């Protein structure tokens, strides 16, 4: 890219909302993680489904626990960190007959650094954005696994009580943070 093209691209990024800028800047990482996970194709049976939910629980629970005490949420206009992913995973695993307390957790040494507000907000961006992807995955899983997973789809559907995803509220708070 020549100097003029770089300056134009830089000005265009300056005018984007933070959520749009993050989406553009992380697009290649998003594609890589999708390819590495291989979802939804990696879930062919009920046992596969249980294993994936257990893996997600081992990640989401410690990350959400690390995010909870950080003080950035009120400044973002959010009463708490977005997401209750681990509680939805617990509901699903329990419905499938799994004791989620016996599952391994990601060691704290492998957790992403979440000591600064920007890091915590970035982590929430990933977690909340993944909720949207979960709905796409679920649309593929339900016809294939149907009755085997009914009553255990809270995590991938992104809700427990029928409420819509929190993505619009989180995105608005993220964009407000980016303008501050």
Image (cartoon, grey):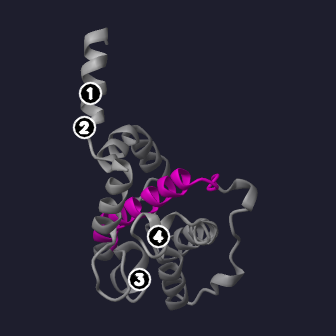
Is 126 included in the stretch rendered in magenta? yes
The span from disc 1 to disc 3 (Cα, nearest Å) is 48 Å
The Cα atoms of the two marked residues, 4 and 2, are separated by 25 Å
Location of the N terminus (image quadrant)? top left
Residue furthest top in the image: 2
Residue 158 screen position, x and y as percent: 36, 75
Marks 2/3: CA–CA distance: 44 Å
The residue wearing badge 1 is 11
As rendered, which of 9 and 141 lies closer to the eye? 9
Q: Earlier in the sequence, mark 1 or mark 4?
A: 1
Q: Residues within 10 Å of mark 1 (few under 14, many from 20)?
A: few
Check the image and report above or below for 2 versus 95: above
- Between 47 and 14, the residue placed more toward the observer is 14
Circles 2 and 1, Cβ within 8 Å, touching? The answer is yes
Quarter of the image for residue 57 reads: bottom right
Q: How far separated are the C-alphas under marks 3 and 4? A: 36 Å
Q: Secondary structure at mark 4?
A: helix
Mark 3 falls on what kind of element?
Answer: loop
Q: Which mark is residue 15?
A: 2
x and y, in percent, of residue 58 in the image: 63, 69
Give the residue displayed 51% in from the left and 51% down from the top: 118
Element under disc 2: loop
């Amino acid at each position: 890219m020549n100097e003029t093209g770089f300056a134009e691209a830089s000005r265009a990024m300056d005018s984007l909302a933070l959520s749009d800028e993050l989406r553009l800047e992380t697009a290649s990482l998003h594609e890589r993680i999708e390819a590495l996970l291989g979802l939804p194709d990696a879930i062919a049976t009920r046992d596969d489904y249980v294993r994936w939910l257990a893996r997600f629980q081992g990640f989401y629970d410690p990350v959400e626990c690390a995010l909870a005490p950080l003080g950035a949420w009120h400044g973002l206009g959010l009463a708490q960190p977005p997401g209750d992913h681990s509680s939805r995973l617990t509901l699903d695993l329990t419905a499938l007959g799994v004791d989620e307390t016996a599952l391994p957790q990601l060691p704290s040494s492998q957790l992403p650094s979440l000591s600064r507000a920007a890091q915590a907000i970035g982590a929430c961006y990933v977690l909340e954005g993944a909720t949207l992807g979960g709905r796409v995955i679920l649309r593929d899983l339900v016809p294939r696994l149907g009755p085997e997973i009914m009553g255990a789809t809270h995590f991938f559907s992104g809700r427990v009580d029928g409420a819509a995803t929190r993505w619009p509220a989180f995105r608005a708070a993220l964009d407000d943070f980016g303008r501050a």
